[in-house]
Image (tube, grey):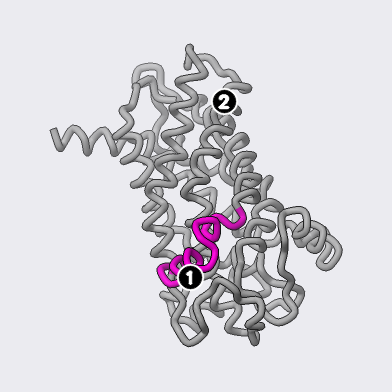
Amino acid sequence: MSSQDLSITAKLINGGVAGLVGVTCVFPIDLAKTRLQNQHGKDVYRGMVDCLVKTARVEGFLGMYRGAAVNLTLVTPEKAIKLAANDFFRQLLMEDRTQRDLKMEMLAGCGAGMCQVVVTCPMEMLKIQLQDAGRLAAHPLDSAHSAGMPSASRRPSATLIAQELLRTEGLSGLYKGLGATLLRDIPFSILYFPLFANLNHLGVHEHTGKASFAHSFLSGCAAGSVAAAAVTPLDVLKTRIQTLKKGVGEETYSGVTDCARKLWTQEGPWAFMKGAGCRALVIAPLFGIAQGVYFVGIGEHVLKYLE
């Protein structure tokens, strides 16, 4: 980690800029991940490339960015909270930050995962509905499985979906799948942040007290891909639970346990790894960019310019 004590404002700017750049670069792959994870037996897409090709052909280039608006709107506070919270907990728990303390690093990561879910859950709840709309267009829909969604006659949008959920279910509607989100994000952060910190520490220069952009970027990519692959089964469960609109014959789930049981019995153990490759391809550059921007210190340069 950098020896500088970054201000909270700088941390928030760094996290926000990193999130915006990262999401813009990898969002189409994230869309493919969501659609692959939601396939129930009858595969519309054979893999990531097939999904992106069919999406571009049927829905146009912008179809690959379905749900990007809500992600770009909320990713700034989400990434800012995640990165700033981890740094805050590290400073709080580790008096001597020059020494590696795996237990404290994991605890700091746990704290970061718990904090970010306040934004992550509703953000992904809305994003998933928009991302999956193109897959559902290939199948007739069962209106009985479309509770909480706008009517088919209206073009789905994050605003319409949020309004309908708030009207019918209240604030809890936006936090459907909160338990599954926590089960995914806390283990991810516990794995990611300590792994990144230790990989990044290997490239810290004695004179500057921080690693180079390239080293931080590669460390973020490596740590992100490992953590992403490890929690993919939990991400599949979260995606299934948060998908409100179902095709004919597709299951609905009452919770994490019910979803896991039905997934295992109906689709087999490999169903838990659906979209694993896509998820690794999303998370690796996303966190590589995030950590690269964070450690370059864009926030500090912005604050200095504004002085």
Residue 105: which disc? Answer: 2
In this picture, which residue range is highlighted in magenta?
158-177
Relative to 115, say whether 256 is above or below. Answer: below
Question: Circle 1 is placed at which residue position?
Answer: 164
SS for callout 2? helix
Left or right of 72? Residue 228 is: right
Observer-nearest of 280 and 5: 5
Q: Is residue 26 magenta-colored?
A: no
Circle 1 crowding by C-alpha within 10 Å: few under 14, some 14–19, many from 20? some
Q: Amino acid at mark 1?
A: Glu
Residue sitting at x 44%, y 81%: 155
* Relative to 257, residue 115 above or below: above
| Amino acid beneath label 2 | Glu
Position of 181 relative to 86 (above/below): below
Q: Residues within 10 Å of mark 2 (few under 14, many from 20)?
A: many
**Residue 272 sits in which quadrant?**
bottom right
**Quadrant where the C terminus is found in the figure:** top left
